[in-house]
Image: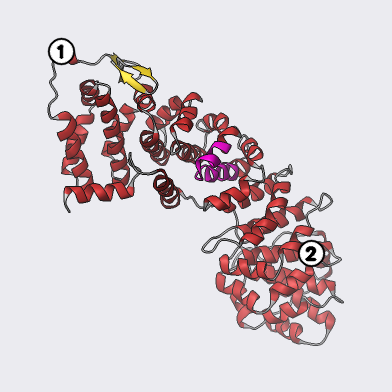
């Protein structure tokens, strides 16, 4: 590949000065999806019902002596004796509720799922409805194939009907089962939505609902918001948003957590999707939840605000005006590196905006803690800081880029030139080139080059001329040729070093973003 071809490929991969704003924004979103998207490991998408409600405790007391074999369960569930049918279904539910290796596939292979679905419609026997719903909940907590076996047996419409049951515990069990089905993926999520499950689910939300029940409702609603390709339809989102915003005012940590995760799913996408959420006025509440000491609240609220910051400049500004830059500095000092990483990711989205937003980032005192993390943080956090710097140097003014150098980013950045990650190496070289371009523009190129050499950076750049990756060695060669080939190490050219920050003092003054010596 020619040198010009290599450079064009590089431009496609990274934000670069001179590219149009829309393309930079699209690239920023693509980068978020490709490199920074973290799965929500702590959230349970499906869950088996192994807890005991009051009703189940009563059931357990009634059938403690029942110890049916599998053959007896099959015979009882298929027989005509109502009492034996209930006992057999209870025994089946108990097998499916056990902690280790529940026989989900076995019950499907025995053809018992359609029978359990049939029991859902027997309003004359609420105990049987409850036991069947519980058993189906646990089968639907399994693999996609096991969940589909429940759906293909016609469970969704009957479970939705149970949302109107006069028995609270049956309504709750139906919610749980629907949550497991919706959590399987976009296909079954849409199957639940298309059966018009959302209105009866939303009607359950009330101040008088027990907290444990409301937790299940909120979790199920969050599963109706998650997954993409495709996203949930606009009509469903319009129905869900007002209740999710209402739930965000609750005090229970689990309810707050799942409501925040729901909003994070809804903001993970196009600017129009972000707009739907932002227009509800929820941003100040989300920012306040970012101050929570509870990680299950902090993490999804931070993710949601970070998603919003990937939107238009106006949407990002709304997050800034809601106070996000007053919270992020403290999150950079959080004991969990996952929080530090998410905070840096949010900052990288802000740094990808116009110079006015970059200035707000500087004014909030965020540069010093970022330098500290670039020196001492975990590598995954350092990578996010490098993205902050890359976006910073792309959209910032000369003065703002100089602020990075003055703040002390150069030394820890040069230290990272020995890493193996080629994409990050190219970003670092790109940032260094921006620093050198700015120094050249203000007549301080030789001073910066000599500082880079004194910090061991020149040796590292020279070593990259022998790198296996074509783009890396080509870029390193270009830096050496363009900036370091004619340095004269005369005494009068030695830069004045600030010993504390390992940077140097520019002899320039800012005048309307233009610099004069």
- Residue holding disc 2: 171
Instruction: Characterize the magenta stretch by its predominant secondary structure.
Output: helix
Q: In the picture provided, is 226 more to the left or to the right than 430?
A: right
Instruction: Name the residue tied to disc 1.
Output: 491
User: Residue 423 — which label?
Assistant: none
Residue 304: say if magenta: yes
| Disc 2 residue crowd, few under 14, some 14–19, many 20+, Cα 10 Å | many
Residue at coordinates 64% horizontally, 57% vertically from top-left? Answer: 237
Residue at 31%, 27% in the rendered image: 411
Q: Which quadrant of the rendered structure holds the C terminus?
A: top left
Between disc 2 and disc 1, the foreground one is 1
Asked whether 331 falls inside the magenta stretch, the response is no
> In this orientation, which residue lies closer to the viewer: 488 or 330?
488
Of the numbered discs 2 and 1, the one sitting upstream in the chain is 2
Up-down relation of residue 105 to residue 494 (above or below): below
The image quadrant where one finds the N terminus is: bottom left
Specify start and end residues of the magenta stretch as a single range: 299-318
Residue 469 seen: no
The location of residue 240, given as percent across then percent down, is: 69, 56
x%, y% of residue 22? 42, 47
Residue 41 locus on image (x, y percent): 54, 52
């Amino acid at each position: 590949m020619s040198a010009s071809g290599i450079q064009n490929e590089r431009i496609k991969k990274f934000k670069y000065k001179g590219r149009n704003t829309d393309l930079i924004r699209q690239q920023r979103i693509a980068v978020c999806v490709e490199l920074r998207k973290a799965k929500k490991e702590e959230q349970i998408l499906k869950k088996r019902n192994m807890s005991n409600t009051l009703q189940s405790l009563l059931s357990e007391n009634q059938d403690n002596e029942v110890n049916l074999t599998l053959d007896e369960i099959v015979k009882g569930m298929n027989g005509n004796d109502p009492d034996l049918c209930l006992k057999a279904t209870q025994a089946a539910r108990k097998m499916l509720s056990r902690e280790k290796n529940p026989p989900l596939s076995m019950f499907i292979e025995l053809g018992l799922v359609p029978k359990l679905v049939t029991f859902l419609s027997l309003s004359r026997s609420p105990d049987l409805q409850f036991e069947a719903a519980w058993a189906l909940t646990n089968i639907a907590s399994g693999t996609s194939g096991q969940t589909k076996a429940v759906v293909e047996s016609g469970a969704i419409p009957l479970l939705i009907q149970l949302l109107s049951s006069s028995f609270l515990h049956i309504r709750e069990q139906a919610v749980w089962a629907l949550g497991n089905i919706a959590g399987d993926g976009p296909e079954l999520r849409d199957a639940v939505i298309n059966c018009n499950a959302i209105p009866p689910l939303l009607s359950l939300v009330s101040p008088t609902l027990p907290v444990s029940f409301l937790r299940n409702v909120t979790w199920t609603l969050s599963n109706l918001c998650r997954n993409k390709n495709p996203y949930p339809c606009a009509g469903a989102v319009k129905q869900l948003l007002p209740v999710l915003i209402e739930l965000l005012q609750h005090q229970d940590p689990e309810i707050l957590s799942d409501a925040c995760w729901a909003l994070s799913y809804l903001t993970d996408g196009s600017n129009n999707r972000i707009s739907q959420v932002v227009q509800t006025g929820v941003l100040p509440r989300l920012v306040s939840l970012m101050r929570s000491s509870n990680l299950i609240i902090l993490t999804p609220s931070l993710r949601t605000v970070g998603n919003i910051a990937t939107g238009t400049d106006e949407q990002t500004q709304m997050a800034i005006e809601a106070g996000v830059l007053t919270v992020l500095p403290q999150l950079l000092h959080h004991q969990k590196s996952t929080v530090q990483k998410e905070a840096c990711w949010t900052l990288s989205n802000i740094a990808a905006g116009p110079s006015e937003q970059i200035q707000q980032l500087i004014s909030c005192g965020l540069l010093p803690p970022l330098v500290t993390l670039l020196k001492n943080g975990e590598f995954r956090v350092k990578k996010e800081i490098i993205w902050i710097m890359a976006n910073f140097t792309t959209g910032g003014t000369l003065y703002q880029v100089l602020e990075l150098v003055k703040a002390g980013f150069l030394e820890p950045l040069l230290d990272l030139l020995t890493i193996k990650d080629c994409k990050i190496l190219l970003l670092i070289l790109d940032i260094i080139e921006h620093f050198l371009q700015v120094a050249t523009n203000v007549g301080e190129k030789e001073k910066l080059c000599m500082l880079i050499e004194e910090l061991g950076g020149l040796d590292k750049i020279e070593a990259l001329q022998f790198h296996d990756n074509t783009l890396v060695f080509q870029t390193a060669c270009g830096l050496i040729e363009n900036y370091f080939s004619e340095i004269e190490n005369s005494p009068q050219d030695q830069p004045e070093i600030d010993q504390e920050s390992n940077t140097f003092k520019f002899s320039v003054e800012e005048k309307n973003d233009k610099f004069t010596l």
